[in-house]
Image (spheres, helix red, strand yellow):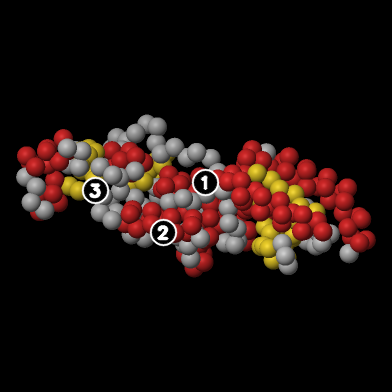
Amino acid sequence: MRDVDESAIALRRLRSPSVFSAADLTEQGFDRARIRAAVAAGVLVHARRGRYLRSDVPAAILAAVRSGGRLDCLSLLELLGVFVKDKPGLHVRVPPNAGRFRADAVVHWRVQTEEPLGDHAVSVRDAAIHAVLCQKPRAAVATIDSLLHLRLLTVDEVDAVFRNLPKRLRILKRMVDGSAESGPETLVRLILRTLPVSVRTQVVIVDVGRVDFLIDGWLIIECDGRRFHEGWDKQVQDRHRDVEAAAQGYVTVRFTAADVLDDSGAIRAAIARILEALGPQHRRAR
C-alpha cells in the first residue's frame, strides 16, 4: 500500500494553499519590503505579476502558475504518482479570457466540473477527464485504473468522469479495473482481452501466493511496474514462487515494465506463441 500512501500525502500537499496574491500576503502582515525580503531569502517565489508561491512547490506547479493557468491533466496526475504512459510535458487549464500563455504548454479550455484544488491545480476528477481525452485508449484506461488503485477517485467519481466525456469514449469504462496494481499490468490485461483465452486476475495459488494473471488455468503471467526498484531479495522470492508454481504444473512468464511499454505487439505475439506451443499439452493434463 506504499503507493497509495504516497499519493494520499501528495494530494494533501496539493490541497494546501500554494498561491498568494499581494493582498493575501498583506493580510498576513507582509508589507512590500517583507515580501521582497521573503523572495530574496527563497521563502517565496515571484511567479508572475501579483502572484507568489511557496518556494517548496513542485516545478510543474510553478510553471503552470507562471503560464497564467492551473496544472491539469497528465501533468497533475503524474505529480500524484498516477500511471501516465508517456512523458506529458506541461498541461495547464486556462480561463476563457486568458491572454498569453506558454507556447510549449498543452492548453485546456474545458469548463471545470468541480472545485479546483486551488489557484494552482484543477481537481483530480477534471484532470482525469482530460487525461482520457489526451491519451490513446489503452493508456487512458491504465491511467483510470491507477487512479482507482491509488484511491484518488472512487468508482462513483470514475462514473462521473465518463459522463463528462464524449459518447465515443464512454465505452472505455467497461475496460476499467481498479484491481490492477501497475500501469503495465493494465496494458497486459488489455492485450489478453484480444486473445481467445480465459483470464483471471489477482489469483491466489496455494504455496505460491497471488499472481497477476492466470490464463486458461495453467499459464501465469506476472508484470510489475516497480519490480526493478525492489532489489535482489524480491527477485529471489519471485524465483522461489516460480519453482513452486512449476512443481504444481503451472508455467510462469514474466514481463518487465519496459517490455510492456515499449512494444505491446511483441508481448501479444509472445503470449500467443506460448499458448500455441504449450496449450494443447496443458489442456490434456488438466
Sequence order check: which comes first, mark 2 or mark 3?
Answer: 2
Q: Amino acid at mark 1?
A: Val
Occupied quadrant, residue 115: bottom left
Residue visible at 84% across and 51% down in the picture: 275
Q: Identify the secondary structure beneath mark 2.
A: helix
As displayed, is residue 14 above or below residue 136? below
Foreground residue among 226 and 107:
226
Q: Callout 2: 10 Å neighbours few (<14), some, many (20+)?
A: some
Q: Callout 3: 10 Å neighbours few (<14), some, many (20+)?
A: many
Q: Amino acid at mark 3?
A: Val
In the figure, is residue 118 to the left or right of 160?
left
Q: Identify the secondary structure beneath mark 1.
A: loop
Foreground residue among 16 and 135:
16
Residue visible at 50% across and 38% down in the picture: 87
Foreground residue among 244 and 16:
244
Q: Amino acid at mark 2?
A: Ala
Sequence order check: which comes first, mark 2 or mark 1?
Answer: 2
Sequence order check: which comes first, mark 1 or mark 3?
Answer: 3
The quarter of the rendered structure image containing the C terminus is bottom right
In the figure, is residue 226 to the left or right of 65?
right
The residue tagged 1 is: 84
x, y percentage for residue 237?
66, 54
The numbered mark at residue 273 is: none
Residue 175 visible, this orientation: yes
In the figure, is residue 18 to the left or right of 278?
left
The numbered mark at residue 8 is: 2
